[in-house]
Image (spheres, rainbow, N blue to C red):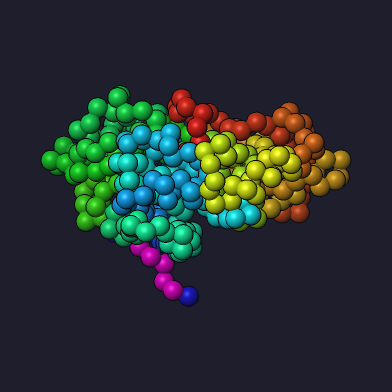
Amino acid sequence: MAPAERTALHGEHLALGGRLVDFGGWELPQQYSSIRDEHLAVRTAAGLFDLSHMGRLEVRGPGASDYLQGLLTNDLAQVAPGRAQYTLLCREDGGILDDLVIYRRDIDDFLVVVNASNREKDVAWMRSHLSDGVELIDRTQALSLLALQGPKAASVLPTSIELSSLPYFGFAEGLVGGVRSKGVQALISRTGYTGEDGFELFVDSERAVEVWRAVLETGRDGGVLPCGLGARDACRLEAGLRLYGNDMDENTNPYDAGLGWTVKLQKGPFLGSEALAEIKARGPLRRMFGLTTDERTIPRHDGRVLREGREVGRVTSGTYSFFLSRGVGMASVAIGEGEPGDRVEVDSRGRAGSAELVSLPIYRGSVKSPTASKN
């Protein structure tokens, strides 16, 4: 087995006592202090994450817009320069290859963020459909990605740009720096994966340590903590944000995953559009719900969802929410087998516990827009 890759911030994680784990082929912190403290910091103040394992791809050149419009499910024509969009990459049969966020820097100049575990697959797929004159450059190693997430993020991020004028899913170039730094040039995006207001910072990997330290130093008095993957997963699950490999995969179509809103069939043909049109006309076979428990039951991935002893669905993601003080999860349930408010049983490691089906998101944080997010 090949050794896990390391981000430019690996030394910072060690210095802060991060408990490192292998995630998508990268060595990253599961937590620093505790998942509980980090989870609560994101919900009440802000947390700083290293997301440099995510794939960062540049797509540019004459025809880049048309190329991506024919490859992705959402309508790129609705995205102006300086704005981002959540979208899906699908197979010809409508199965989801990945979910991603695309940033439009100019008419034919894009930055695309894909899931870490899917990067090589996505790059190969995208290159196999590449149009003449369009370049696809993998910038994952050269460009680091940090995320500051939480209700206080805007007030503690040390930057030269006016954050109050930056809309949700908007981005701008600016400096990020602390009291002992003149600042580092970064692309600052008002996006995230926690359900809270926050920002993602794209910086040259050679300057990532400076930015990491500057944000922690400036935010320390405001309660900012470095946060690991455990807190990130709990927050995104509360917010109803999908995790590729758990809540969807190549055998899942967007409508069954509750992501049909990302499919814009009216924009014209794109890869998978014919199959997706047939699926939409037929109607979804499954529905995504949130789950909450009122016992010591913690929903776990692939656990059975039961009604009166019958299996009606499967848990796709689950964890314990320190913020909500209960088990939470997401479940894929057969159409007609449940509605919000219905009581079900969840098989958690061989033990059935009571749960309630709820609408997503389970918890709505400081983000005002209902649009889903990803990083």
- What secondary structure is the magenta-colored segment mainly? loop
Q: Tell me where residue 59 appears, x and y as whole percent.
A: 35, 52
Residue occupying the point 54% across, 52% down:
271
* Residue 2 appearing in the image: yes
Q: Position of residue 304 (x, y in %)?
A: 75, 49
Q: Residue at x 20, y 44 (%)?
A: 185
Direction bottom: furthest residue: 1
Residue 139: image location, x then y, percent: 32, 57
Examine the image and state in which quarter residue 85 appears.
top left
**Is 205 included in the stretch rendered in magenta?**
no
Number of numbered markers: 0
The vertical placement of 101 against 127, above or below, is: above
Q: Nearer the viewer, residue 274 or 24?
A: 274
Residue closest to the eye, 14 or 178 = 178
Note whether 231 is above or below 25 in the view shown.
Answer: above
Residue at the spot 21% in from the left edge and 48% down from the top edge: 210
Of residues 371 and 367, which is closer to you in this image? 371
Kindly tell me whether residue 8 is visible in this rendering: no
Residue range corresponding to the magenta coloring: 2-8
Question: Horizontal placement of 310 versus 375: left or right?
Answer: right
Q: Quadrant of the C terminus?
A: top left
Left or right relative to 88: residue 138? left
Relative side of 75 to 279, left or right: left
Magenta region includes residue 7? yes
Q: Is residue 216 above or below residue 89?
A: above
Residue 103 lies in quadrant: top left
Position of 124 relative to 88 (above/below): below
At x 22%, y 34%, the residue is 159
Residue nearest the observer in this picture, 300 or 166: 166
